[in-house]
């Protein structure tokens, strides 16, 4: 048998494929999935129901539906796709401290786009929909943590870098389910954290490696009678692989639990602080000279989070249970950005010739306005220069732009679930509601500076309007008419409410019908505090009822057919509502201006496929597989566009329609000593309208505009995605795994007309290995980008020319290259008896 193992390992190693680390497999459970954000099985982020083992045959499901709680259903009764990663999957990427890497490695149809140049803050693209930490990116995925929606209040941004990876128990990516509320256009990411009931022991991890990375984590879980405690903390510091791109992460998470035979409660707290530098793309002319190059800096992002949450579940009868949560969340983010500026000597038509003016190319004279009155609006003034700033020829002017976003959110959810039989049929009924309230404040200002030869932007004490960055509002710039550049200060509030009900009935032992709906209501109010942008002040209301219906048919444990239809919606964010006028554009994310009302985005999703599991396939192992197809049509999709003549500034606009459709295929084999997987996804993301969009720096644009026709591809979404991997026990205690991801080419952002060359296709290969010295001590290593492949996952355009009056830039393309070959190593020590790993469900992924 050992020779057979080595032979199989050698044959697999010859494949251009790679990896998933898993220490063991259990065939004693069948996976069920929480189909609502609220309520999971007792003490577990991955609820399950028992199974029986027939002599010499496969595991058989026990029809004990009373063991299921809340919205949990066996996977074979869910009429849509569910993709899952567990704590065991996350262990593969333990050296990254980044759960997003695991999602990208395992989930078909999910790729990452790195606009920031830091793999701790990347955009998730799933089926062509995004969840991003970057303010201004349209957010098409709803994200929940322990039942609480964590899309931030001001821009619906998602900051997964604030969650300690070591404390995550399970992540489910759920599609076609409007119960998850706003933003679930492409689906929802549902994160369940560990607690003292499902993880016990004490574990310390320490690691180091490339780019000066030093990191460590601690987790401790314990049960004391009906009580449980769990604590996790981790930290990371490195200098980054690009210039001026350090990362510092500190995160803590705690859970105090109490349960009885018919109830369970958890008090949860979390705090985090992260700091990242060099968050932007780089001109390709620079990266051809040095791949580590960046553009102007500083570009630092500092984020802080504090949250407290109470969750509970009570079984009020053998067939009814009530669950809910309440939370308080405090979020703060500060962004400092050194930028090139669009300043010039005031026009000859201006009364202020010889003073500093802002370029007026992106603006149009009002009816009846003289040319002199129009140009006079663009005189630059500051706190230290209320009558204008003298223009000096040859000075490479820049700006230090500072934004600060703060939000205080609170709310909760309440849900009831019933498992009574209806007309003799098994039935699962769920009804619930949620309310989320947030008060936010947003401030921004620009300070006049100069671009130094090293591309740093610093204040210039020789000008009358110089200032220091640390204080927002201490020094600022604006045009005389507050057009294009002006300080902003906005306060506001969001109120999101939802009511939902779903029912799944077993028409036969094999056929299940699901139907339901959710009502979403949103009220978004904002108030301008500066007097420069009175049109920002306003209150907007959005509401929609989103239905869901689907069927599943289980031919056998090996074949499960599913199909469904659902609708979804996304309300415009406060940022988008306040920045929707092309005549008064925003320096994203620095200024807020007038707000022609945007419409909400509405989606219609169709999905069909089949999936199954084949136990005892080889050497006692299990085969999981799936084949599925989907299509989502959006109306009034929201895009972010650059302004003609002022490409650094932008605005948001509705477009009539876009479409995401595709096919996903997955196959996985798991045994106690070997796991192998492969999956493929075709993602066809297209525009479905004819129109003109602004893209001033696109080399193929005409007067700053491009034409879009139905069938044009949505930028940054590769059509083809292929992922393969394996993990094998080479010797007792020694495991080796590899993982490869390959993606086809994609268009640059700003090339919605698809006229320019694409970002090239690429692949990336990662390696991991671990050796267990004894039951307490484990050594591990991790290598990213094993072949040191040079590729980019993000690209856009900018205005070429002479930078800092000394660096000629001809190519209008900018990219963020991926991290080169990096090597990490570390140790993990478990005190006392090593905690027994939670059993993995046999239907774990599909």
Image (tube, rainbow, N blue to C red):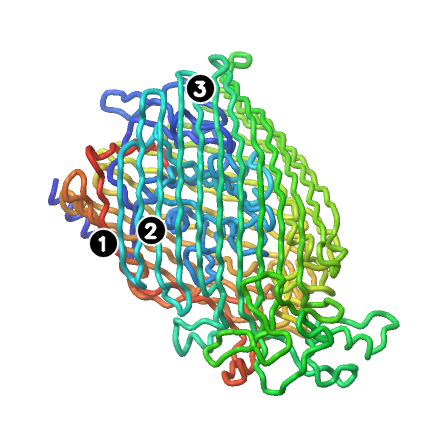
Q: Nearer the viewer, residue 679 or 355?
A: 355
Q: Nearer the viewer, residue 546 or 770?
A: 770
Q: Is residue 646 above or below residue 555?
A: below
Q: Is residue 187 visible?
A: no
Residue placed farthest to the bottom in the image? 393
Report, in whole angstroms, how far the alpha carbon at label 2 lies from the one at label 1: 12 Å
**Image quarter for residue 655?**
bottom right
In the picture provided, is 391 more to the left or to the right than 167?
right
Mark 1 neighbour class, 10 Å CA radius: few under 14, some 14 to 19, many 20 or more: some
Residue 724 disc label: 2
Q: Quadrant of the N terminus?
A: top left
Report, in whole angstroms, how far the alpha carbon at label 3 lies from the one at label 1: 49 Å
Secondary structure under tag 2 reads: strand
Q: Position of residue 765 (x, y in %)?
A: 32, 58
Secondary structure under tag 3 reads: strand
Q: Nearer the viewer, residue 375 or 510?
A: 375
Residue position marked by numbered label 3 in the rendering = 263
Report, in whole angstroms, how far the alpha carbon at label 3 lies from the one at label 2: 42 Å
Mark 2 neighbour class, 10 Å CA radius: few under 14, some 14 to 19, many 20 or more: many
Which label's residue is closer to the chain start, 3 or 2? 3
Residue position marked by numbered label 1 in the rendering = 13
Instruction: Give me the residue at 62% from left, 57% from top.
Output: 443
Q: Position of residue 82 (x, y in %)?
A: 45, 38
Q: Is residue 355 above or below residue 108?
A: below
């Amino acid at each position: 048998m050992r020779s057979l193992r080595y032979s199989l390992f050698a044959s697999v190693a010859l494949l251009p494929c790679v990896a998933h680390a898993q220490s063991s497999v259990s065939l004693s459970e069948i996976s069920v999935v929480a189909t609502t954000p609220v309520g999971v099985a007792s003490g577990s982020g991955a609820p399950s129901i028992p199974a029986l083992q027939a002599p010499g045959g496969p595991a058989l499901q026990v029809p004990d539906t009373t063991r299921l709680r809340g919205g949990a259903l066996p996977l074979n009764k869910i009429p849509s796709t569910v993709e899952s990663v567990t704590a065991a999957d996350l262990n593969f990427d333990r050296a990254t401290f980044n759960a997003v890497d695991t999602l990208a490695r395992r989930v078909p149809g999910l790729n990452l786009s790195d606009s920031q140049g830091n793999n701790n803050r990347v955009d998730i693209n799933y089926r062509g929909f995004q969840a991003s930490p970057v303010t201004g990116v349209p957010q098409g995925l709803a994200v929940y943590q322990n039942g609480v929606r964590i899309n931030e209040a001001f821009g619906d941004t998602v900051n997964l870098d604030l969650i300690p990876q070591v404390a995550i128990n399970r992540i489910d990516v759920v599609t076609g389910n409007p119960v998850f509320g706003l933003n679930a256009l492409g689906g929802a990411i549902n994160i369940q954290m560990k607690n003292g009931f499902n993880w016990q022991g004490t574990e310390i991890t320490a690691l180091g490696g490339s780019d000066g990375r030093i990191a460590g984590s601690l987790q401790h879980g314990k049960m004391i009678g009906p009580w449980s405690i769990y604590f996790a903390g981790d930290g990371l510091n490195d200098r980054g692989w690009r210039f001026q791109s350090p990362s510092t992460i500190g995160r803590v998470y705690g859970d105090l639990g109490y349960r009885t035979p018919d109830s369970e409660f958890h008090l949860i707290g979390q705090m985090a602080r992260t700091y990242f530098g060099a968050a932007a793309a780089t001109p390709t002319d620079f990266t051809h000279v040095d791949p580590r190059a960046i553009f102007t800096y500083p570009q630092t992002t500092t984020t802080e989070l504090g949250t407290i949450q109470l969750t509970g579940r009570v079984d009020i009868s053998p067939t009814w249970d009530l669950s809910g949560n309440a939370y308080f969340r405090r979020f703060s983010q500060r962004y400092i950005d050194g930028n090139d500026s669009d300043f010039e000597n005031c026009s000859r038509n201006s009364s202020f010739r010889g003073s500093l003016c802002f370029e007026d190319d992106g603006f149009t004279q009002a009816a009846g306005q003289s040319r002199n009155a129009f140009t006079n609006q663009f005189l630059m003034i500051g706190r230290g220069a209320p009558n204008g700033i003298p223009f000096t020829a040859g000075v490479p002017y820049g700006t230090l732009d500072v934004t600060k976003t703060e939000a205080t959110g609170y709310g909760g959810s309440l849900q009831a679930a019933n498992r009574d039989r209806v007309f003799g049929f098994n039935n699962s009924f769920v009804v619930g509601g949620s309310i989320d309230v947030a008060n936010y404040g947003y401030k921004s200002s620009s300070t006049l500076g100069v671009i130094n030869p090293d591309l740093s932007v610093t204040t210039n004490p020789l000008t009358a309007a110089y200032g220091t960055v640390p204080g927002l509002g201490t020094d600022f710039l604006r045009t005389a008419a507050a057009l294009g550049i002006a300080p902003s200060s906005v306060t506001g509030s969001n109120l999101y409410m939802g009511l939902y009900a779903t029912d799944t009935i077993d028409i036969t032992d094999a056929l299940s019908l699901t139907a339901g709906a959710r009502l979403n209501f949103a009220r978004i109010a904002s108030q301008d505090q500066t007097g420069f942008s009175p049109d920002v002040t306003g209150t907007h209301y959005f509401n929609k009822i989103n239905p869901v219906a689907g069927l599943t048919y289980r031919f056998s444990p090996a074949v499960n057919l599913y199909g469904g239809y659902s609708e979804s919606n996304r309300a415009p964010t406060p940022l988008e509502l306040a920045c929707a006028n092309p005549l008064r554009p925003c320096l994203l994310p620095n200024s807020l201006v007038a707000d022609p009302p945007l419409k909400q985005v509405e989606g219609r999703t169709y999905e069909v496929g089949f999936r199954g599991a084949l136990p005892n396939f080889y050497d006692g192992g299990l085969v999981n597989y799936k084949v599925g197809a989907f299509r989502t049509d959006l109306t009034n999709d929201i895009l972010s566009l650059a302004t003609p003549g002022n490409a650094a500034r932008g605005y948001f606009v509705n477009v009539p329609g876009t479409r995401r459709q595709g096919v996903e295929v997955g196959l996985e084999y798991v045994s106690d000593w070997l796991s192998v997987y492969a999956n493929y996804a075709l993602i066809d993301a297209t525009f479905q309208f004819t129109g003109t969009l602004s893209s001033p720096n696109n080399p193929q644009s005409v007067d700053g505009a491009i034409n879009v026709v139905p069938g044009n591809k949505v930028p940054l979404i590769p059509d083809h995605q292929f992922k393969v991997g394996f993990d094998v026990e080479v010797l007792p205690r020694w495991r080796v795994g590899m993982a490869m991801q390959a993606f086809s080419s994609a268009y640059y952002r700003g090339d919605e007309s698809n006229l320019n060359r694409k970002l090239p296709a690429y692949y990336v290969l990662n390696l991991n290995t671990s050796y267990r010295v004894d039951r307490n001590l484990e050594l591990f290593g991790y290598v990213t980008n094993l072949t040191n492949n040079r590729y980019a996952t993000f690209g856009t355009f900018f205005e070429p020319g002479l930078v800092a009056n000394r660096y000629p830039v001809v190519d209008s393309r900018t990219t963020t290259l991926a991290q080169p070959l990096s090597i990490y190593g570390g140790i993990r020590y478990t005190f006392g008896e090593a905690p027994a790993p939670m059993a993995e469900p046999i239907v774990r992924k599909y």
